[in-house]
Image: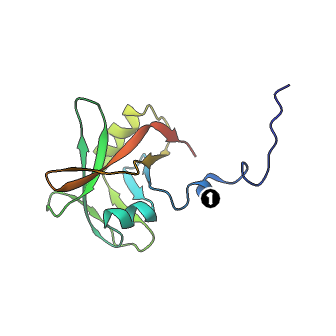
Amino acid sequence: MALIVYNKENSRPQEVLYKGKRTINLDSRGTVYLSKTMSIELGVLGGGRVSFAHDDDTGDWYICRTTDDDGFIVWKDKRCARFSAGFIVHRLMRQAKVERKSVQFMMAKTPMEVNGTVYYKILLSNPILR
């Protein structure tokens, strides 16, 4: 018998389970949504610019805050950081082998710093499908 007992803890909607966590949501139209927690930590809640970085050796992807004019413009929104990055979204979804219209990924708890820029790793190995 493979009996699974459901209770309040294991039968909550995913939105509740990931509330307050560092997450990034991608949709097939190319829109990126950073959770409010991640937006605050990155310093882009309510506006700013971000860039993505790819490590060719490991295949890992990162996101960082930038002041460069070439960065993706984060729309002014008090709820979450939102911006459009179609090319990057499609690369991330392809690498994670996601064939859905939207996906969510956790972000690393501890950022890494390279030349004074703080990068947060996008954890592509475990996509959260909604």
Q: Which residue is mark 1?
A: 16
Q: Is residue 85 positioned above or below 48 on the image? A: above
Q: Is residue 79 positioned above or below 85 on the image? A: below
Between 31 and 3, the residue placed more toward the observer is 3
Instruction: Name which residue lies at 72% across and 52% down.
Output: 9
Instruction: Name which residue lies at 83% across and 32% down.
Output: 3
Report the side of 37 relative to 56 (left or right): right
Between 128 and 117, the residue placed more toward the observer is 117
Dot 1 falls on a residue whose secondary structure is: helix
**Rendered-image quadrant of the N terminus:** top right
Instruction: Name which residue lies at 56% across and 55% down.
Output: 18
Report the side of 108 relative to 99 (left or right): left
- The amino acid at mark 1 is Val
Circle count: 1
Q: Quadrant of residue 82?
A: bottom left
* Residue 85, position as x, y percentages in the image: 30, 51
* Residue 39, position as x, y percentages in the image: 38, 64
Q: Badge 1, how many Cα within 10 Å: few under 14, some, many 20+? A: few
Q: Is residue 75 positioned above or below 101 on the image? A: below
Residue found farthest to the right: 1
* Residue 62, position as x, y percentages in the image: 29, 46
* Residue 108, position as x, y percentages in the image: 39, 48
Instruction: Name which residue lies at 36% across and 70% down.
Output: 45
Report the side of 17 relative to 40 (left or right): right
Q: How is the image coloured?
A: rainbow
Q: Quadrant of residue 92?
A: top left
Residue found farthest to the top: 1
Between 3 and 90, the residue placed more toward the observer is 3
